[in-house]
Amino acid sequence: MCGICGKLIFRSDEAVSPALVKAMADTIYHRGPDDEGYYVSGPIGLGFRRLSIIDLQRGHQPLSNEDGTIWIIFNGEIYNYQELHTFLLSKGHVFKTKTDTEVIVHLYEELGPECLQKLRGMFGFAIWDGNKKTLLLARDRVGIKPVYYCLTDTSLVFASEIKAILADPSIKREIAPELIDRFLTFKYVPGEQTLLKGIQKLAPGHYLLVKNGNAMVRQYWDLQFEETRQNMSVEEAESNLLALLTKTVQLHMIADVPVGVLLSGGVDSTGVLSLAVNETQKQISSFTVGFDGQEVADERPYARLAAQKFGTQHHEITITARDFAAFMPKYVWHMEEPVCEPPAIALYYVSKLAREHVTVLLSGEGGDEAFAGYSNYRNLVWLERIKKGISPLNGALAQGLSVANSLLHIPRMAKYVPLMTDTFPDYYHSRTAIRNRHARNGFGRLYSADFASSIDHEYSLEPLRRLQAHVKGLNTLDAMLYIDTKTWLPDDLLIKADKMTMANSIELRVPLLDHRVLEFAASLPSSFKLNGFTAKYILKKALSHRIPKEIRNRKKAGFPVPYASWLRNDLKDMVSMVLTDRKTLDRGYFHKDAVEKLIKANSNGSDYSKEIFSLLSLELWQRTFLDREKVVLQ
């Protein structure tokens, strides 16, 4: 796990400054404190920060082929590199190291960009081909590793993190205001754009090829929901899945440094741990986090149960509202885009604890997206079934439920009542079943008149609309799984996972997001994933004999963080200070009265914690990346 950066100037008579490449790499020191390296030759400059995981002594980068004509900088892990190494030796290639990085160089010599089809792992890398004068920039299939770039008429600047691109003084720091509504709609920014004009995300499963100043983006992988295993029995699927998971975790355990497991006390992380303990003779360390106060479910007793069963050296950390607030400025700096993801702060603290003991962490991230673990999948599938069964009565039923809700005040009912008369594509905004909440509840007045008049809400939804068009014909469950895999997973969850662990120089590995696991899950009938009201049906069956029944049968808790209570109580003054500050309001996006009303409503018991955290993240992001302030919260 490392950090990459670089610049390609399109005019061959201009040269990249070595000092610039060094400055870019210095901004991502946290991604690789063990080593640094540079290759600068005329118009191309490559920079690298290394976190040593495999072949600790000889894994220096940038790394080249035998004659020094092809150079690579690589962030990630290729889990089938040993198999590829054997294949390349048979083709006559000569290796200087035992790293997975060098495997990619020689595989590129053999196959060009088609080498990506052979790689099994997580990666973001750049290859400079001096023979063809081309630069290949590539990102793994699912988007586990980030790759950003800025393409202008004169150059391409790229890096693992945005801050490295901003180290180039030729790159302007300008907000794309039209994306603020997209952020506040989704609570993250889906798609290839970022809130900084001109800085793009390379989409998962894509590569960028640049030659003679011409850039071409191509997709090399997509997740296909074709249910090709319709005739497979549940027993066969269970057996095949367990074999696949066993092999996948085995590959993810390859490292020359200590490996630990991040435990949430749930099925996914416990299942990963149950497989990991069989792949090492050493005692595994495990880590979990809890919170000060009683506002949320405590995951720690279940994590301890898993640790005891599998004999790990277990470690815990507890964080408070003060810890949460103190880290907010650094949260924004590391995330680099405003994202409403409070669990990221908890992940930072538990990663910091883990770094005292290990360099690599395995987690259960991805099981819910692959095998339909979230309650909204179950709820919306059943909602659509009900609507189809009583379609002529939908309006009357919705009205009846609305009356019932007005009398009973049931939050869950309030959430789904409006959807009775909406079509699925209109309301599924990737991880939410409600249209922009500001519009629903009258907080559309949050926007100033000038800003509101400039907003095209359909433009905000454009990344989703593209995906909705793509999934036409799929059943409701598979459509949701595909959309989430293309949006919420890479643009929120995996960004959080990468940035918060790398902030502590930790490599996080996610076996359940191995592309072969995802492809297997996508090929199964929907009923194998959501069986009646049972979520993650086939995954739970495959792991059932390995996981304590207390964990297997517990209600899903996610990653509960009591931030709603903290924002309403302990951090209320801090929230008000930032969101009603003159600097915030002078940006011209929001009405002061509406912001104050939002804060007051939240303090009085209405739950607008996501909106408030989103607004707080947005403002702190602007102060950090646009105003270049060193933000300190009291």
Image: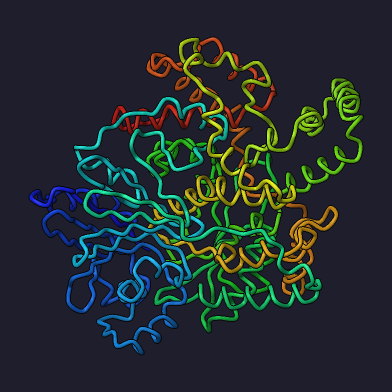
Q: Measured along the vertical axis of the image, is residue 483 above or below residue 522? A: above
Identify the coloring: rainbow
Q: Pick whichever, 208 or 490, lies toward us.
A: 208
Q: Quadrant of residue 33?
A: bottom left
Q: Quadrant of residue 622?
A: top left
Residue 446, percent across and down?
55, 16
Residue at (30%, 74%) from the top-left corner? 109
Residue at (22%, 64%) from the top-left corner? 132
Q: Quadrant of the N terminus?
A: bottom left
Q: Pick whichever, 463 or 411, lies toward us.
A: 463
Q: Pick whichever, 113 or 82, lies toward us.
A: 113
- The answer to whether residue 105 is seen in the rendering is yes
Residue 339, percent across and down?
50, 38
Q: Measured along the vertical axis of the image, is residue 65 above or below residue 529? A: below
Residue at (68%, 46%) from the top-left corner? 472
- The answer to whether residue 265 is seen in the rendering is no
Residue 388, percent across and down?
86, 40
Q: Measured along the vertical axis of the image, is residue 279 above or below residue 573? A: below
Residue 70, percent across and down?
23, 69
Q: Is 249 displayed left or right of 414 in the figure? A: left
